[in-house]
Each structure stands twice: as C-alpha cells, then as structure tokens.
C-alpha cells in the first residue's frame, strides 16, 4: 500500500477522524531529506497496513494545514491518534526510530 496524499481539503476526514493512528509527513518536492524519507515511508505503509495510516502533506500545496501544525522546517512528521497530535519528529528519521514510534501507537 502506498502512502496516502493528504490535502487541506481532506486532512480532517483522513487524519483527524481516522479510526486508526496516522503518521503524517509534511514534505516538499524540492526537499532533499524529504526525498530520502519517501522510500522509508512507503516501506512502513506496507508493513503497518491496516494498523496505521501513513500519508504525506505537500507544504507547498497545503499551506493552511502546515501552518496549523506549526511546520517550520521539513520534513516534519506528526503522529496523530484520536484526532490529537501525540508525537512528532523533525528532519530525517531512521526507519527503526519511526517503527518504534508507530509501535507505541498501535
């Protein structure tokens, strides 16, 4: 399963109202560390399918959502459970560390 694409329009429905935890990656196409993180997130999306929803928000296209969550540098990853941000990370995060954070949510 590929990572989902979240926008200003679908963020509330897809993320805040999700019945499973959600990892949200705030990224931009021009961001080097974001490109390094992309295949890691794709792998995790497959491994956690059905347990955690994994998706991305392009900050250039969804500025309102990025602003709402105080995203100042990218990549920024937030972990949402029950409509609330329960954890976050900034910068490139190794797969093992992301997996630990996801395991804490499920």
Image (cartoon, rainbow, N blue to C red):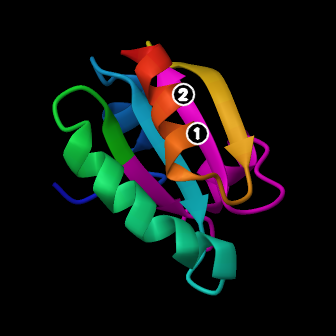
Q: Which residue is drawn at the image coordinates 70% and 41% (left, top)?
A: 89
Q: Which residue is mark 2?
A: 101
**Contact? badges 2 and 1 (CB < 8 Å):** yes
Magenta stretch containing residue 65, yes or no?
A: yes
Residue 97: in sight, yes or no?
yes
Q: Position of residue 50 (x, y in %)?
A: 16, 30
- Within 10 Å of disc 1 (Cα), the crowding (few <14, some 14-19, many 20+) is few
Q: Residue furthest front?
A: 96
Say if 37 sits above or below 69 in the image: below
Q: Which residue is mark 1?
A: 97
Q: Position of residue 22 (x, y in %)?
A: 41, 32
Say if 64 sits above or below 39 in the image: above
> The N terminus appears in which quarter of the rendering?
bottom left
Q: Quadrant of residue 91?
A: bottom right
On residue 81, which mark appears? none
> The C terminus appears in which quarter of the rendering?
top left
Q: Nearer the viewer, residue 8 or 86?
A: 86
Q: Nearer the viewer, residue 66 or 1?
A: 1
At mark 2, the secondary structure is: helix
- Within 10 Å of disc 2 (Cα), the crowding (few <14, some 14-19, many 20+) is some
Q: Which residue is drawn at the image coordinates 65% and 25% (left, top)?
A: 87
The number of numbered badges drawn on the structure is: 2
Q: Residue furthest bottom?
A: 30
Q: Position of residue 26 (x, y in %)?
A: 59, 57
Q: Quadrant of residue 41?
A: bottom left
| 49 with respect to 26 (left or right) | left
| 103 with respect to 74 (left or right) | left
Residues drawn in magenta: 55-81
Magenta stretch containing residue 95, yes or no?
A: no
């Amino acid at each position: 399963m590929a990572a989902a694409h979240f926008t200003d329009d679908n963020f509330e429905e897809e993320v805040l109202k999700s019945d499973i935890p959600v990892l949200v990656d705030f990224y931009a196409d021009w961001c080097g560390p974001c490109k390094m993180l992309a295949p890691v997130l794709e792998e995790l999306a497959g491994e956690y399918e059905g347990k955690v929803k994994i998706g991305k928000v392009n900050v250039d296209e969804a500025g309102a959502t990025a602003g709402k969550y105080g995203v100042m540098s990218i990549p920024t990853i937030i972990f949402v459970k029950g409509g609330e941000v329960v954890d976050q990370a900034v910068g490139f995060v190794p797969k093992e560390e992301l997996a630990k954070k996801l395991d804490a949510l499920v």
